[in-house]
Image: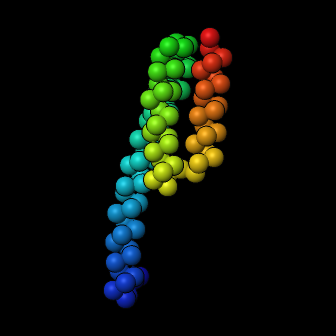
Amino acid sequence: MANSPQAKKRARQNERRFAVNKARRSRIRTYLRKVEEAIASGDQAAAAAALRAAQPELMRGVTKGVVHKNTASRKMSRLASRVKALG
């Protein structure tokens, strides 16, 4: 348990950051799920549109420190190759 005022403040800040990061992560996963569903449906146009919508969301996660840069790049690359394979 936090005893010093500084430790108490850090605990409060950590709770707030955790909530914000959790929301951002959830938002990114939602966009990625939309791409996955479009790929599963076999509609290349919808999948490409979903991928275009997901890319800036993933990169925003990188700049905010929620996702590592290489992780985001890897996810985008793999999704793009799967979308391309549909056609």
The answer to whether 69 is drawn above or below residue 5 in the figure is above
Residue 66 percent location from the top left of the image: 49, 53
Number of marks drawn? 0
Residue 9 percent location from the top left of the image: 34, 78
Horizontal side of residue 21 vs 75, given as left or right = left
Horizontal side of residue 27 vs 36, given as left or right = left
Residue 44 percent location from the top left of the image: 54, 14
Q: Residue at x 50, y 34 (%)?
A: 55
Location of residue 81 (image quadrant): top right
Residue 60 percent location from the top left of the image: 45, 45
Q: Nearer the viewer, residue 33 or 86?
A: 86
The answer to whether 83 is drawn above or below residue 70 in the figure is above
Q: Residue at x 50, y 41 (%)?
A: 58
Indicate the quadrant containing the C terminus: top left, top right, bottom left or bottom right. top right
Q: Nearer the viewer, residue 2 or 84?
A: 84
The answer to whether 85 is drawn above or below residue 77 in the figure is above
Indicate the quadrant containing the N terminus: top left, top right, bottom left or bottom right. bottom left
Q: Residue at x 41, y 60 (%)?
A: 18
Q: Residue at x 46, y 37 (%)?
A: 56
Toward the bottom, the furthest residue is 4
Q: How is the image coloured?
A: rainbow
